[in-house]
Image (cartoon, rainbow, N blue to C red):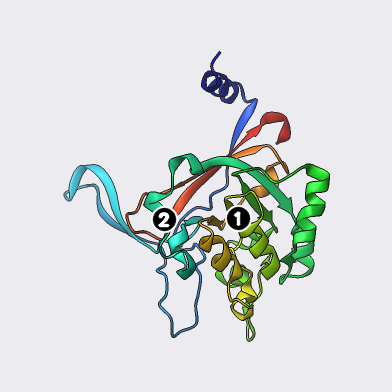
Amino acid sequence: MTPLAALTAAMASGSVKVIDLTAPLSSDTPILRLPEQFGQTATFELEEISAYDDRGPAWYWNNFRTGEHTGTHFDAPNHWVTGRDSDDVASVPASRLVAPAAVLDFSTEAAEDPDFLLKVDQIKAWEGEHGPLPEGGWLLLRTGWDARSASQEAFLNADGTGPHTPGPSVECARWLAEESPVIGFGVETVGTDAGAAAGFEPMFPCHTFMHGAGKYGLTQLRNLALLPPQGAVLVAAPLRIVRGSGSPARVLALVEGDEV
């Protein structure tokens, strides 16, 4: 049996399961809010073209409008100034859209401190227990933040001092970009950086370092609790938008059945 035949047989038997890591995309999907002086992303909107009526008697379809970085989405390197000369989302090699994933669970820490910052020594401690991060794979940070996704306010968790959401420390972002073997970093929050990262040096270090290194981001993931620490295979499928800086994406994980 060929490897692909074995995979399809395993999926048919249920010994390999497909886990959807994608949040539904609708007008209720939480979106990033920047300070008022900056341009803003659009809330997702559907505009009906026809619905089996005189505008189109046998078909239903819609136009939609939204930002590239709305809902569960993929960040391409050219999204940030440090990666401005790197790949747009249409240029990301297809081979990089299917890759192994490591899932680091810091949901307890994030529940106790919404400003939790992932540190390099925490990753290394995790590697001591679960093995090295996958070469050419993804590091996914589980914080339990997907439980807040029904509310824009709870999801952004902002007050007078700004948003309070978990993410990587400056040193961790630099290490992921420059020293780790992964090609991307994925989170359950609205962006790959911590909520307080506008005040870091450099500001938004995950974007700054990762995209400057030609690496990728995934945001607003869910169901990471269903994935094992090691062994899942991630399928990230953004729209192939020419000159696009990112795209809403359907993100799936293939997991061996006894891991779920």
Kindly indicate the quadrant of the structure image that contains residue 11.
top right
The mark found on residue 98 in the picture is none
Residue 251 image point, x, y percent: 52, 46
**Distance from label 1 to label 2 (Cα)?**
17 Å
Mark 1 and 2 residues: CB-CB less than 8 Å, in contact? Answer: no
Q: Residue furthest left?
A: 54
In-front residue for pair 68/184: 184
**Label 2 is placed on what type of residue?**
Asp
* Quadrant placement of the C terminus: top right
Residue 203 seen in the current view: yes
The residue at 62%/73% (across/down) is 195
**Label 1 is placed on what type of residue?**
Phe
* Quadrant placement of the N terminus: top right
In-front residue for pair 98/148: 98
The residue at 59%/61% (across/down) is 149
Which residue is label 2 attached to? 87
The residue at 41%/55% (across/down) is 87
Residue 231 image point, x, y percent: 68, 37
Residue 101 image point, x, y percent: 64, 44
The residue at 42%/67% (across/down) is 43
Q: Residue furthest top?
A: 1
Q: Residues within 10 Å of mark 1 (few under 14, many from 20)?
A: many
The mark found on residue 185 in the picture is 1
Kindly indicate the quadrant of the structure image that contains residue 58.
top left
- Earlier in the chain: of badge 1 and badge 2, it is 2
